Image: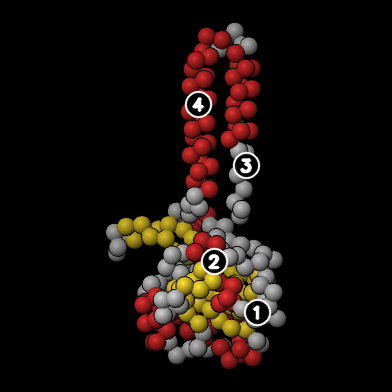
Amino acid sequence: MDHIITFDLLDSHLFLHLICIRWNKSMYLRSNCSMLNKLKISLLFLLGCTSATYLSGAVPNDPLNVNPIEVGSMVPEAELITVKGDTVSLSDVIGEGKVIIIFYRGSWCPYCTKHLAAVGHHEQTILKKDYRIIAISPDLPEGAKKYAGETEFNYSIYSDSNLSTTRAFGLAFESYSKWMQKNQTLPVPAVYIIDADGRVTFRHFNANYRERLAPEDLLNALN
C-alpha cells in the first residue's frame, strides 16, 4: 500500500486496554471504569472509521495532501480509456518504450492546454530521444476525442474518467466545483518520465495548477 497506517485496530485495542487497567489501579479513577470503557469503545470506533477511510482509497480534499508515487517506483497497474471508448491497461499503453506521462485537469482548463501546447512544440526533439508523450485527464472519452481532434500535435490522449490511473499515481484530490455545484475529483497536474523498464525516472507535480513544468526543464530531464 502507498499509505501507511501507523497502528492497526488490534494494537489500538491492546494499547487502550492497558491504559484502562492502569487507570483502574488509580484510586481517583476506580469509580470511573464504566466511563473509561465507553471511552475505549468510542476511540476504537473512531480508529475503525479512520482505517476504513484508508482502505477504501479515499482521496484528500486538499491538493497539498496528495501522495504521488516517487522516482524509482514501477508504474502501477491501472486502466485508461481510448478516444474510441475502449478500456486498455496502462501497461499496454506504455508498452516497452520510454514515455512522458502528462496528467492534466481537462481540456476545459486553459492552463492545461497551454502547457500541453508548450510541450508539443518540442515534440520532434522528444521523439528523437525515443520518448512518446501520453496525456491523461478525467475528460470523458468523447471530450478527449474532441480535444485530440483540435490539437495539432501527435501525442496520445487518453481518458481517465474513472480515475483509475490518477488514483494509482496518488494524484487524485476532491474539489468543490462552483460551476458544477458539486464535488469533483481531479488530478494534481503532473509530469512523469518512465523508462523502458516501466520505472519512474522523473516526476514533477505542483498543487498550484497555474504553475507548470517548463518544457526546457522537461527536455533536460530526458536521458
Label 3 amino acid? Thr
Label at residue 78: 2
Foreground residue, 153 or 145? 145
Foreground residue, 95 or 193? 95
How far, Cα to Cα, is label 2 from label 1?
A: 16 Å
Please identify the quadrant where the C terminus is shown: bottom right
Q: Residue at x 53, y 57 (%)?
A: 66
Q: Earlier in the sequence, mark 3 or mark 1?
A: 3
| Residue position for label 1 | 96
Q: Earlier in the sequence, mark 2 or mark 1?
A: 2
How far, Cα to Cα, is label 4 from label 1?
A: 52 Å
For the residues bearing labels 4 and 1, Cβ distance under 8 angstroms? no
* Residue 97 location, quadrant: bottom right
The local secondary structure at tag 1 comes to loop
Location of residue 104 with respect to 33 vertically, above or below: below
How far, Cα to Cα, is label 3 from label 1?
A: 37 Å
Q: Residue at x 61, y 62 (%)?
A: 69
Q: Earlier in the sequence, mark 4 or mark 1?
A: 4
User: Is residue 102 visible in this depiction of the protein?
Assistant: yes
Label 4 amino acid? Ile
